[in-house]
Image (cartoon, helix red, strand yellow):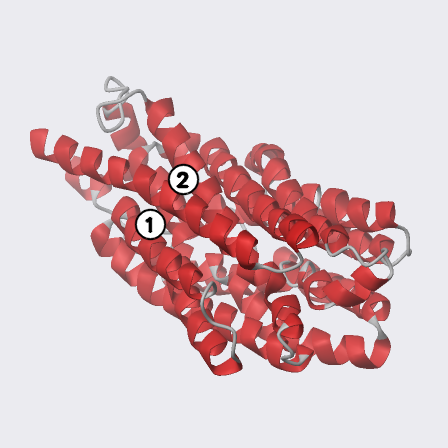
């Protein structure tokens, strides 16, 4: 009887239905910050010409959702993920409407507080933990799928937003998208987000392993801190092309339409290649997956330093999309592999806080360096340096993992 409980799988067809619904929800919620990215030059023109203003708004949205995820993860653990998702959708709607007010503080509060801290924070981290509890055999593939929501948003929405902004302006585009959030996300949450199944064999394993507090032979929080810092560093690099590619293309004389298409290609490749990375992560584990992905991201980021024509930038953007796509789900998978399920509700949001902070820092930093130097090369070179530091940390974790596994 004990062996039957231990190896019983909770994965069913319903698990994948839930994962697909969560993918749709995140593809909508993460579409909201892309409006300011596509309209970066238009918003900057209304803010004294400073690109750091709309770039900071996008950064605040990332920082907010990362910081709020810890609180929302705690809330979802007690009231259920359905209600945090509904609340988050309502806050994203409010943030988009407030951001159209015309004042810089309204743009910052709308993005940072409502869309980030109260909005996407109620969806992203709680849904990562929620979906991970529906899977025990193909968890890496499931996490890769749902974490693609942000990149599916980037693949689908920038081209649509560019056309909408051209015809209706960025303010009406925000208002229209705010209404769409409520019309789609709230019904999906009510219908599909029911309590997940219990994973009995993980509970048993956690109790059995409670006498061994170390992770990879170190204090658990030392390894956890290294994972979190690695997530911050790689996401600084990750965010720079995503938030500034359309403006960068415009500086090179490439039209905004082509730039938005290029961004869609970058994020579309991120979405499709992430599914392959998920399949690999189920076989390689989270740390090795993150290490390989980070090396590819660094190589592609270096390409932005040497390429300035449209064909070359499409190629580099494609490579970048393939490179970065495994990183965030690999960190979440690593947490689920190394730590008990009972700690997931706070460890996963804490790591996502650091990755979100990295995304926010990178987007703002690229805009700040552009305002100082007048071109993007210093920003992209800084991104490469951050990525190298990330690779070094992941390499240490990988060596430690291999050594510890060998000793055991």
- Examine the image and state in which quarter residue 221 appears: top left
Q: Is residue 192 left or right of residue 331?
A: right
Q: Are marks 1 and 2 in contact (CB under 8 Å)?
A: yes
- Above-or-below relation of 129 to 22: above
Assign the C terminus to one quadrant of the image.
top left
Mark sitting on residue 337: none
Q: Of helix, strand and loop, which one carries label 2?
A: helix
Residue 251 place in picture, x, y as percent: 66, 71
Looking at the image, can residue 1 be seen? no
Disc 2: CA contacts within 10 A as few (<14), some (14-19) or many (>=20): many
Q: Residue at x 72, y 65 (%)?
A: 35
Q: Is residue 168 left or right of residue 395?
A: right
Q: Of helix, strand and loop, which one carries label 1?
A: helix
Report how far apart the C-alphas of labels 1 and 2 lie in the structure. 10 Å
Q: Which of the two residues, 115 or 380, is positioned nearer the viewer here?
A: 380
Q: Is residue 355 left or right of residue 66?
A: left
Q: Which of the two residues, 58 or 90, is positioned nearer the viewer here?
A: 58
- Above-or-below relation of 257 to 131: below
Residue 17 place in picture, x, y as percent: 46, 64
Residue 111 place in picture, x, y as percent: 74, 49
Q: Residue at x 79, y 79 (%)?
A: 166
- Above-or-below relation of 86 to 72: below
Question: Which residue is the site of mark 2?
Answer: 230
Assign the N terminus to one quadrant of the image.
top left
How many tags in the picture? 2
Disc 1: CA contacts within 10 A as few (<14), some (14-19) or many (>=20): many
- Examine the image and state in which quarter residue 83 appears: top right
Question: Which residue is the site of mark 1?
Answer: 290
Residue 139 place in picture, x, y as percent: 34, 52
Q: Residue at x 63, y 42 (%)?
A: 63
- Above-or-below relation of 187 to 7: below
N-terminal of the pair, mark 1 or mark 2, is 2
């Amino acid at each position: 009887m004990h062996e039957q409980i231990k190896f019983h799988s909770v994965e069913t067809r319903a698990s994948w239905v839930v994962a697909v619904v969560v993918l749709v929800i995140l593809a909508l919620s993460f579409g909201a910050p892309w409006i300011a990215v596509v309209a970066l030059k238009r918003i900057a023109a209304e803010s004294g010409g400073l690109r750091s203003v709309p770039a900071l708004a996008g950064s605040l949205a990332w920082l907010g959702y990362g910081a709020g995820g810890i609180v929302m993860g705690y809330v979802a653990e007690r009231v259920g993920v359905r209600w945090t998702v509904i609340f988050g959708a309502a806050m994203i709607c409010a943030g988009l409407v407030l951001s159209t007010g015309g004042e810089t503080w309204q743009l910052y509060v709308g993005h940072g507080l409502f869309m980030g801290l109260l909005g996407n924070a109620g969806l992203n981290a709680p849904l990562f933990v929620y979906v991970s509890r529906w899977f025990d055999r193909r968890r890496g593939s499931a996490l890769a799928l749902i974490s693609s929501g942000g990149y599916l948003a980037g693949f689908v929405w920038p081209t649509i937003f560019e056309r909408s902004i051209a015809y209706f302006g960025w303010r009406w585009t925000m208002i229209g998208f705010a209404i769409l959030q409520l019309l789609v996300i709230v019904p999906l949450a009510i219908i599909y987000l029911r309590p997940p199944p219990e994973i009995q064999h993980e509970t048993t394993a956690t109790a059995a392993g409670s006498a061994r507090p170390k992770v990879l032979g170190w204090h658990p929080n030392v390894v956890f801190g290294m994972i979190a810092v690695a997530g911050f560093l790689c996401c600084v690099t990750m965010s720079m092309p995503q938030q500034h590619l359309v403006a960068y293309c415009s500086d090179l004389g490439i039209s905004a339409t082509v730039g938005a298409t290029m961004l869609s290609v970058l994020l579309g490749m991120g979405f499709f290649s992430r599914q392959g990375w998920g399949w690999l992560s189920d076989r390689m584990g989270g740390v090795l997956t993150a290490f390989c992905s980070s090396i590819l991201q660094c190589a592609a980021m270096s390409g932005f330093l040497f390429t300035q024509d449209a064909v070359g930038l499409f190629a580099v953007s494609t490579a970048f999309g393939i490179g970065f796509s495994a990183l965030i789900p690999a960190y979440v998978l690593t947490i689920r592999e190394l730590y008990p399920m009972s700690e997931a509700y706070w460890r996963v949001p804490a790591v996502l806080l650091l990755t979100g902070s990295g995304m926010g820092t990178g987007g703002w930093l690229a805009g700040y360096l552009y305002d100082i130097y007048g071109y993007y090369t210093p920003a992209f070179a800084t991104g490469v340096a951050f990525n190298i530091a990330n690779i070094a940390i992941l390499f240490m974790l990988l060596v430690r993992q291999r050594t510890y596994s060998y000793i055991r």
